[in-house]
Image (cartoon, grey):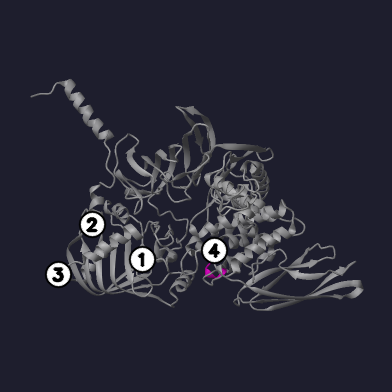
Amino acid sequence: MSIPFVRRCVLFFCLVSSTLFAQFAPNAHPIYQALRTGGFGQEAYSVQNLLLKRGGATLKLDGKIWLLGPVNNKHIGLAFTGTGILSVTPPTPSEQRQLRLFSRDVEFVEHFDEMMLFFTDNTYDEVKAAGQPDSSPAPAGVLSDARKRLRDSLRYNLYGRLQQDVMAQQPGGLFFAMIKGKHYSGKMLFVVDPHGVPSIDPLEAPPLDVAPEEVAVTVYDEMHGGVWTAYYLPQEYMDHTAKGTQKNDTFFIEHQDIDATMEKSGKLDGVVKTTIISNNDELNVVRFELFTTLRVSKVVDSSGNAMHFMQEDKEHDAQFYVVLPHALKMNEKFDIVTTYSGKDAIRNEGGDNYYPLARDNWYPNKPFGEYETYDMKFHIPKGMTMVATGIPVSSGEENGWAVSVWKSAVPQAVAGFNFGRFKKDQAQLKTRNNFQIESYTNINPPDIVQAIQHAAEPGMSLDGSHGSAATLGTMDTRSFGPKALAEAEMATDLYWQYFGPIPYQRLAMTQQTASNYGQAWPGLVYLPITYFFDTTVRHQLGMSEAKGYFRIVASHEVAHQWWGHAVGFKSYRDQWMSEGFAECSASIYTQMVNKKPDEFRKFWSDEHELLVQKNKEGVRPIDVGPVTLGYRLLNGRTGYDVPRRLIYPKGAYILHMVRMMMWNSKSGDELFQKMMTDFVQTHYNNVASTEDFKTAVEKYMTQGMDVDGNHTMDWFFNEYVYGTALPAYSFESSFVDGPNGTTLLKFKLTQSKVDDAFDMIVPVYIELPNGHVPRLGSIGVRGNNSVEQTVNLGPLKERPKRALINWNYDVLSE
């Protein structure tokens, strides 16, 4: 029986509509379900002396192996019991040293009797070729224990990563060994991934975040947790491609179109269209970073066609994966539209104060550092003000909401916001292209401040008991908005002079309810609420002014507009430049704006103390490892405070030492300024590596800096950037009469606690009777040696008080 034409059209439209607007339940893709729930297959083998060699490591296996059932005709894992040995030899001396630091052995050899191994490489072929068929029952406990650890301890959805390779036609290269070690730790991972070791955030250990490096050994127990070693594939060192510049990830993000609504409770609702570009010839699955309490309800393409996605429970392995409707080719673009909602990413702190807890993953994103363009539209409660990265395009009211539209002027490393009931102060730097500077302070105090104020009322003590009241100074942050504005003005103007312009048109200094840290996004700074209290209040609240934190936090965060944003960092090994250069910039601010020499030297004395003072683990941060290890230095063995106490001050010292070597009495910092401005312009609105900075220094190095006569700074970078050297100095001097009424300075400089090849240029100063301390010159010294010299100072009205070295903390030393 034929269907009338009109009915056929209606039926066709209904079928198309149901396909177009259908939604897939999360985690419903059949391949994903097979990966996550599948068990052992039919194959099992006995092996003797099976050697699996991967990424500079060898797994030696004697025992039994049970293969997991194949998924999409691909083998994806095995369980092993028996006698196993993992031996690892990193391909670089620095990584060998770091592994020894953790293992406390000359060689890293871990014994185990149980392992769960997931793979997408040719492991199956090697096992089958070397093994003898075996009929022993599969150890279900090994698999269930591994799955529990993935879900609860590692909080990592490995199955989404496996699906990337399982859906591809070509073999993958993933090798993910979960090892129950008997000597070092029962919670050990050995991972090889040609797309960079995946980012993992264990429950009881520091994060594993070392991409683009492809090999890592990490421990995820509470006592020894941390990345023990990480490096590129050994072949890449031979090919000279083992660099942070390599782009081995599967895709990049080109543009984000964000429509976000923030309710008065802090609940966030978002719809984001993300334009990706494939970096793979066969891209099927993509992973985004998204705050775990933000739950995805729908994923579609730009035409509204539903797409499969994975997002497990927020307390466990909640990584957000999207399955593409077809495999993308290299450089192919695709739009993914994600609808999500949730609490906790933004906290309502009371008094119309809001705390953005999710700073870089409040929208589907990739790890910090890829430069993308943004269009953003925000809906917030009426009467409040939104401050965001980028340029404000428009603002108004729609349906009872305060609505604002923002657009990035240039690609940005990240996007962010702050909002509340703000008081605004503003200024303009007319000599800096009319650069706009604003400060925002909350009109009303958050709940925590109200509680403190209530505790200080008559009849109530600060600890909550009844008694005599402590009189608090003002906690109204609005009166300190002009201070933030003024410091931002001075810092921006100074840094513009030293480092050149930045690619942004404005800078907003905003108050946040966090009390102990600041943060900077492009054109947006979050300052701790305690910055806006006076010193009396901070003292009454028990907050120490030690290390001058509140004197430099604003200038440090302003400096991140240059270091971290105008110039980003290529990998975790280069992050020291972002924090270290911002810290050094704050020292220049202290010197040039405050114009107090003692405060400048106090700054460097504090930085020195952070490096050389032992922590509660009995470790000096300076000795733990080079700055190029970045936040990998976060571990249970040497102390969780080491990264902050090494990356910031030593990174700052490295730049400070370069500045001191370039300085001269005639032109001051002119050469240093030229170098830094050139460095910014060369890597403008892009990422830079440690080697890029070394190239910049070598371009502008003075003749005196060419210690080895080869016009390279290898000597300095090997000692202080890639090494952990810390020389000690002693200095003896005297003034004697010279011929014809002159004064002679005789001195002896001794360098110790270094290797024989250690070179350094040490500045020598003299203190004059009026208290002025000019630099006399510099003296080079190599190894554990002494240098003696006599210098004719000419005829002097008055003999200097003394001669000295390291007056401006020119050289990082004991």
- Residue in the image at 38% along x and 69% along y: 56
Q: Which residue is mark 1?
A: 190
Circle 1 Cα neighbour tier, 10 Å, few/some/many (<14 / 14–19 / ≥20) = many
- Helix, strand or loop at mark 2: loop
| Residue designated by label 4 | 627
Determine the secondary structure under disc 1. strand
35 vs 518, left or right, is left
How far apart, in angstroms, are the residues tagged by discs 1 and 4? 24 Å
Q: Is 197 in front, or is 595?
A: 595
> First in sequence: mark 2 or mark 3?
2
- Work out how far the residue at label 4 is from the one at label 3, CA to CA, in angstroms: 52 Å
Between discs 2 and 1, the one toward the N terminus: 2
User: If the image is split into quadrants, where does the C terminus sit?
Assistant: bottom right
Mark with earlier residue (4, 3): 3
Q: Label 4: few (<14), some or many (≥20) within 10 Å?
A: many
Looking at the rendered structure, the secondary structure element under dot 3 is loop
| Residues at circles 4 and 2 in contact by the CB criterion of under 8 Å | no
Relative depth, front residue between 778 and 695: 778
Which one is in front in this view, the residue at disc 2 or the one at disc 3?
A: 3
Q: How many numbered marks have been drawn onto this rendered protein structure? A: 4
Which x, y percent locates residue 790? 80, 75
Q: Which residues, given as a range, are shown in magenta?
A: 622-626
Residue 547 on image: x %, y %: 64, 60
The three-letter code of the residue at mark 3 reads: Ser
Instruction: Kindly indicate the quadrant of the structure image that contains residue 752.
Output: bottom right
- Is residue 527 visible in the rendered image? The answer is no
Residue 623: say if magenta.
yes
Which amino acid, by three-letter code, is at mark 4?
A: Val
**Can you identify the residue that label 3 sits on?**
135
Would residue 633 be seen by someone viewing this image from the given angle? yes
